[in-house]
Each structure stands twice: as structure tokens, then as C-alpha cells.
């Protein structure tokens, strides 16, 4: 994964990673073998504090946070190409 230099890039990368890990942990608790417990203060914070707190936020607040953060979700679709006569 490419290294991001800004704080918001770092925050976005960590949030994405640990929210995905948390989703895997919840699925494993239901369907499969238990994952390893979090190791170190960083993993404990992201998995025991950040992910549960983020899950409690209402969707409207999550959407505003995502729009405020730089990233791929802010990209817009390209306009459709100009039509130049019949396709056939």
C-alpha cells in the first residue's frame, strides 16, 4: 500500500484497515474460527475503541465525516461522451 503523508490520509488508511479487520472479527465470531486477539496499544485502540465508536455513529454523521476527508469517495463521475450520430 502506498504511504500517505498527510494526517487525513493516515487516518483514512488506518480507519479503513481496522474497520475491515473488525468486520472480519465479527463474521468469524458467527461463522468461523476466532481471530487472534489484538496485539499492542495501536490494535487495541483501533479495534476496541475506534471501531465500536464508529459503529454507533448515525449514518448522516458518518457521511459528513467521509465527505470531509480526502479520498476516492469524493471523486465524481466523468460526464457522458457527446453523442455523434447513430451507434450502428
Image (cartoon, rainbow, N blue to C red):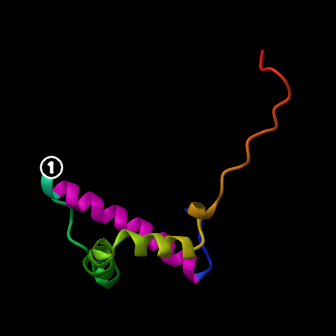
Residue lying at 28% horizontally and 81% vertically, measured from the top left: 49
Is residue 32 among the parts visible in the rendering?
Answer: no
Identify the image quadrant of the N terminus: bottom right
Residue shown at 15% from the left, 49% from the top = 31
What residue is pinned by disc 1? 31
Instruction: Determine the image quadrant of residue 46.
Output: bottom left
Between 45 and 64, which is closer to the camera in this rendering?
A: 64
| Residue at (21, 65) in percent of width and height | 36
Q: Main secondary structure of the magenta part?
A: helix
For image coordinates 53% across by 77% down, the residue present is 10
* Quadrant for the C terminus in the image: top right
Q: Which residues make up the magenta segment? A: 7-28
Q: Residues within 10 Å of mark 1 (few under 14, many from 20)?
A: few
Question: Is 11 part of what is drawn in magenta?
Answer: yes
Residue 61: x and y, percent?
41, 75
Q: Is residue 16 left or right of residue 8?
A: left
Amino acid at each position: 500500500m502506498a504511504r500517505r503523508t498527510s494526517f487525513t490520509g493516515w487516518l483514512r488508511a488506518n480507519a479503513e484497515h481496522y474497520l475491515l479487520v473488525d468486520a472480519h472479527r465479527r463474521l468469524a465470531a458467527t461463522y468461523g474460527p476466532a481471530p487472534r486477539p489484538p496485539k499492542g496499544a495501536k490494535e487495541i485502540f483501533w479495534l476496541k475503541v475506534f471501531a465500536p465508536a464508529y459503529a454507533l455513529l448515525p449514518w448522516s454523521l458518518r457521511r459528513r465525516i467521509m465527505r470531509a476527508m480526502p479520498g476516492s469517495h469524493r471523486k465524481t463521475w466523468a460526464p457522458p461522451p457527446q453523442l455523434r450520430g447513430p451507434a450502428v
